[in-house]
Amino acid sequence: MPIQAILVIIVLVVIYISKCFQVLNEYERAVVFRLGRLVKDVKGPGLVLIYFPIDRMVRVSLRIITLDVPPQDIITRDNVSVHVNAVVYFQVLDPNSAITAVEDYMFATSQMAQTTLRSVLGQCELDELLSEREKLNVELQSILDKQTDTWGVKVSHVEIKKVDLPQEMQRAMARQAEAERERRGKVIASEGEYQAAEKLVMAADMMAAHPMSMQMRYLQTLVEISAEKSSTIVFPFPMEIMKTFSSMMNTSPTVDAPHTAAPQKPAIQQPPPEPPAQV
């Protein structure tokens, strides 16, 4: 036999052996079709033997796949048009079903995620969409998981990434937020005034019950004012001290001072009575 024929046979044997023996990674599994029929036993990982060309092998990854859902035009229940995109995390649990139950499980999961996103978010209002994302994420994940369960695909998590609002709606929400902040500021200021008034009433009642506390507060205020050297303090004279001095003056004994006697007026001499006339 010529050497060329031997070399050709060796090459064909090497190619055949390379087709029969496949190496699968730890995260990969092989779905084998033998003469078009599915072999139920999933092969892998490691070295896998198939009978080429009778067998045909399809590799399936068991790792979690991150699927980016493109932005969707959604009209909420309160007639607001928004653009929403999301991300879906899913994993193949049954390689046989993922290959035989659906033509392309990646494309099918992507389309199902888009339609579910539009249908679920279209039933909620804008405020709910912005404030209750966790609730919507759980609802989306539950619906997608039920729909992809027959494909051998497990949807583990769905996350709404971004919500784009129209410019008019953004300005309206900004005005609403500003008005809400002003309202809160006024409420807080009024509550502070109310509490301060309550404390002032309590302080006034206490000072009325203890008059000496008013004098102590007065002196403390004078000390605080006197810290500024450029200020002029007018110290009023307390009326209580005036009352004390006046009472002392009224009760003290009086001292008679020496004085000259006032000149007496001369007595007016009356004329003597006339004698009675004789008849």
Image (tube, rainbow, N blue to C red):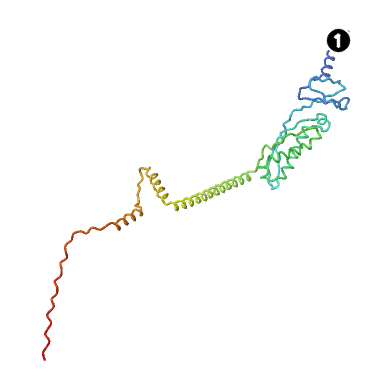
Whole-percent x, y for residue 51 in the image: 86, 20
- Using a 10 Å C-alpha cutoff, classify the residue at mark 1 as few (fewer than 14 neighbours), some (14 to 19) or many (20 or more): few
Whole-percent x, y for residue 256 in the image: 22, 59
Whole-percent x, y for residue 26 in the image: 76, 23
Residue 154 lies in quadrant: top right
Residue 139 lies in quadrant: top right
At x 72%, y 39%, the residue is 138
For mark 1, what is the residue?
Answer: 6
Judge whether 234 appears above or below 271 on screen: above
Instruction: Tell me the amino acid under the disc marked 1.
Output: Ile
Q: Is residue 177 left or right of residue 251?
A: right
Label 1, secondary structure: give it: helix
Q: Please name whichever residue, 255 or 220, is drawn nearer the observer in this view of the structure.
A: 255
Judge whether 26 appears above or below 229 on screen: above
Whole-percent x, y for residue 181 in the image: 57, 46
At x 13%, y 82%, the residue is 273
Residue 47 lies in quadrant: top right
Judge whether 236 appears above or below 9 on screen: below
Quadrant including the N terminus: top right
Q: Is residue 111 left or right of residue 8?
A: left
Q: Please name whichever residue, 51 or 89, is drawn nearer the observer in this view of the structure.
A: 89
Quadrant including the C terminus: bottom left
The residue lying furthest to the bottom in this view is 279
Number of numbered tags placed on the structure image: 1
